[in-house]
Image (cartoon, rainbow, N blue to C red):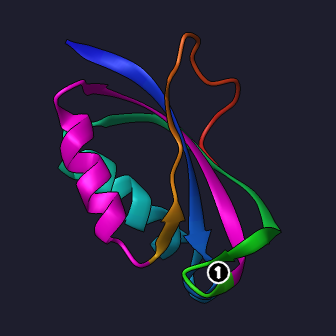
Amino acid sequence: MAQLYEGMFLLDNEVVREDWTKAKALALDLLEKNGASVRTARRWDERVLAYPIKRRQRATYLLAYYEMPREGITGLVRDLDLSERVLRYPLLHARDGPQGGQG
């Protein structure tokens, strides 16, 4: 049974500056590869990081709500860990759905 999750993905700004659509697809493709159905995904802000992550000083945030079976989380975490373009990715079980639309 699919559950609702919230993910905040910190994306590498080098990719974001080249093409936002491509940068967004990096995270969303990994979700879909692992069985997620994305409800909404929107760009937040570009921010200075409190400390360097993978030698990056800045990142752009992507907030996504998605449904996926619990079994898919393990594969998703593995794929996110291997990605050089997704710097961090807190994943939370969401109680309520997104407020807003695609961004």
Query: What's the residue type where badge 1 is placed?
Result: Asn
Q: Is residue 37 above or below residue 31?
A: above
99 and 96: which is toward the camera: 96
- Asked if residue 81 is among those painted magenta in the image, a careful observer would answer yes
Picture residue at 75% right of the left edge, 73% below the top: 51
Q: Which residues are magenta?
A: 57-84
- Residue 80 drawn at (x, y percent): 35, 60
Picture residue at 45% right of the left edge, 27% below the top: 5
Q: Is residue 67 above or below residue 1?
A: below
The residue tagged 1 is: 13
- Disc 1 element: helix
38 and 55: which is toward the camera: 55
Picture residue at 22% right of the left edge, 24% below the top: 69
- Residue 10 drawn at (x, y percent): 60, 62
- Residue 1 drawn at (x, y percent): 19, 12
Picture residue at 65% right of the left edge, 84% below the top: 56
- Asked if residue 54 is among those painted magenta in the image, a careful observer would answer no
Drawn side of residue 71 relative to residue 66, left or right: left
